[in-house]
Amino acid sequence: MKDMMIDMMVTMMPIMKPFMWFSVVVAIAGFVFIIANVVFKLNNAKAIKWTSGIVLAASVFFLMAQVAGYFLNMPPTINFGDSSKFEFILVNFWEVGVGFLVAGIVMKLSGKLNRAA
């Protein structure tokens, strides 16, 4: 069972960086929707709800992957350096997950505040 999970983690690692960047784009889009809601008084509550939900789901995924990595004695990281130049800037999944968690909560709360106003 442990070997199967380790193989699954090794297989999924190349996909994690694009998934993280997708989540960053969704978070930026959510904040753009919030700014448009405040500045132009647009009613885009559904878009804010969807983007905050996607970002919160990504945060839960990264945090749970970190927990699973600890149990497998393989804490997962994302390399922001250029490995062809032997630059390794490793960031733990929990750091990425906490960043998305904070962004998702801020988006969720500001979306609710803008709907109430």
Image (cartoon, helix red, strand yellow):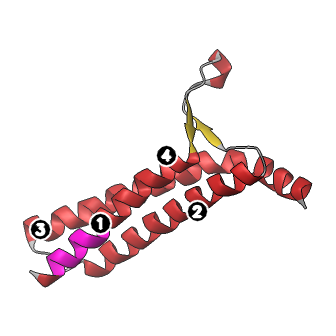
Q: Residue at x 59, y 19 (%)?
A: 87
Q: Relative to residue 112, is residue 13 depicted above or below?
A: above
**In what element is the residue under mark 2?**
helix
Cα–Cα gap, marks 1 and 3: 13 Å
Residue contact at pointers 3 and 2, CB within 8 angstroms = no
Q: In the picture, which quadrant includes the C terminus?
A: bottom left
> What residue would you read off at disc 3?
38
Q: Locate residue 51 relative to residue 11 in the image: left or right.
A: left
Residue 110 included in the magenta stretch of the image: yes
Q: Check disc 1: other Cα within 10 Å, few if <14, some if 14-19, many if 20+.
A: many
> What residue would you read off at disc 2?
61
Q: Which region of the structure is painted magenta?
A: 107-115
- Can residue 34 be seen by looking at this rendering? yes
Report x, y in % for residue 53: 43, 73
Residue 28 included in the magenta stretch of the image: no
> What residue would you read off at disc 4?
95
Of labels 3 and 4, earlier in sequence is 3
Of labels 2 and 1, earlier in sequence is 2
